[in-house]
Amino acid sequence: MSDNKNDRGARDRARVSGEEKYEVDYIAGKFNVSAEEVRRIIKEVGNSREKIEERLRGGRR
């Protein structure tokens, strides 16, 4: 899984776990979308925070 509670380094912060409600809720709130939308995007692009946020910005970096 992407969210290892014992690994708080930059590599762990670079990922979003679709199974962790607080992570999904944070991204959903940041981009004003539903948690389901965030989970759908995670399934499409993987758990890379950068790719998820890029998709939510409409493909813009």
Image (tube, rainbow, N blue to C red):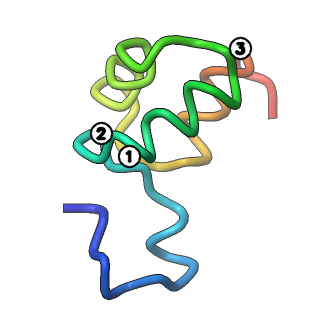
Are the residues tagged 3 and 1 within 8 Å (C-beta)? no
Q: Relative to residue 35, is residue 2 depicted above or below?
A: below
Disc 1/disc 2 C-alpha distance (Å): 8 Å
Question: N-terminal of the two: label 3 or label 1?
Answer: 1
Q: Relative to residue 39, is residue 8 depicted above or below?
A: below
Where does label 3 land, which residue? 58
Are the residues tagged 2 and 3 within 8 Å (C-beta)? no
| Residue 49 in picture, x, y percent from top left | 54, 48
Front residue (pair 31, 41):
31
Judged from this view, the residue extending furthest toward the left is 1
User: In what element is the residue under mark 3?
Assistant: loop
User: In what element is the residue under mark 1?
Assistant: loop
Number of residues whose C-alpha sits closer than 10 Å to that of mark 1, classed few (under 14), some (14–19) or many (20 or more): some
Are the residues tagged 1 and 2 within 8 Å (C-beta)? yes
- Which corner quadrant of the image does residue 27 belong to? top right
The residue under label 2 is which amino acid type?
Answer: Gly
Number of residues whose C-alpha sits closer than 10 Å to that of mark 2, classed few (under 14), some (14–19) or many (20 or more): many
| Residue 54 in picture, x, y percent from top left | 67, 31
For the N terminus, the image quarter is bottom left
Say which of marks 1 and 2 sits in front: 2
| Residue 20 in picture, x, y percent from top left | 30, 47
What residue is shown at x 53% (from left), y 62% (from top)? Answer: 14
Number of residues whose C-alpha sits closer than 10 Å to that of mark 3, classed few (under 14), some (14–19) or many (20 or more): few
Q: Relative to residue 37, is residue 4 depicted above or below?
A: below
| Residue 41 in picture, x, y percent from top left | 41, 22
The residue under label 1 is which amino acid type?
Answer: Asn
What residue is shown at x 47% (from left), y 82% (from top)? Answer: 8
Question: N-terminal of the two: label 1 or label 2?
Answer: 2
Q: Report the disc number at residue 19.
A: none
Where does label 2 land, which residue? 18
For the C terminus, the image quarter is top right
Where does label 1 land, which residue? 47
